[in-house]
Image: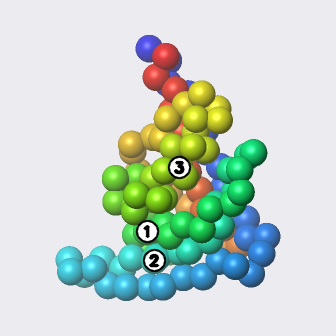
Amino acid sequence: MTVLLLLAAIVAKTQGAYDEVREADDGDVVVMRTFDWEIEGERARRVTVHWLLQEDGSMRYDFDRQPAATQDAHRRSCALQGMQPSRGVGLISGEGTIHGFSCTDLR
């Protein structure tokens, strides 16, 4: 079984992205980032990604914690590569980075 990983980091190109920061019931800080997710061959979709803020300032993406519209955009983006969304946890960090996602091919 071969596992391929595709990781994409999207750098802010427009001023359309914005964040809402909330504290979860368990005390974790969740950054709810809304932006237009561009999918090749389709009109960009407005989605909100739920990032869990880490102590070092990076943010953790967990597919299973995302809203349905965000999961759908992730699935469509991966499908263009013949893959499916990775079910693990991904991290992003760095100035100007607004999003990142990973795809897995389990062939």
Taking 84 as reference, is 95 left or right? right
Residue 59 visible at all = no
Q: Earlier in the sequence, mark 3 or mark 2?
A: 2
Circle 2 is placed at which residue position?
31
- Are the residues tagged 2 and 1 within 8 Å (C-beta)? yes
Disc 3: CA contacts within 10 A as few (<14), some (14-19) or many (>=20): many
| Amino acid type assigned to the residue bearing label 2 in the image | Val
Image mark for residue 74: 3
Taking 46 as reference, is 22 left or right? left
In space, the residues marked 3 and 1 are separated at their CA atoms by 13 Å
Circle 1 is placed at which residue position?
50
- Residue 54's image quarter? bottom left
In space, the residues marked 2 and 1 are separated at their CA atoms by 6 Å
In this view, 80 is above or below 28: above
Q: Secondary structure at mark 1?
A: strand
| Amino acid type assigned to the residue bearing label 1 in the image | His
In space, the residues marked 3 and 2 are separated at their CA atoms by 18 Å
Residue depicted at x 47% and y 59%: 69
In this view, 6 is above or below 4: below
Q: Position of residue 13 (x, y in %)?
A: 79, 70
- Are the residues tagged 3 and 1 within 8 Å (C-beta)? no
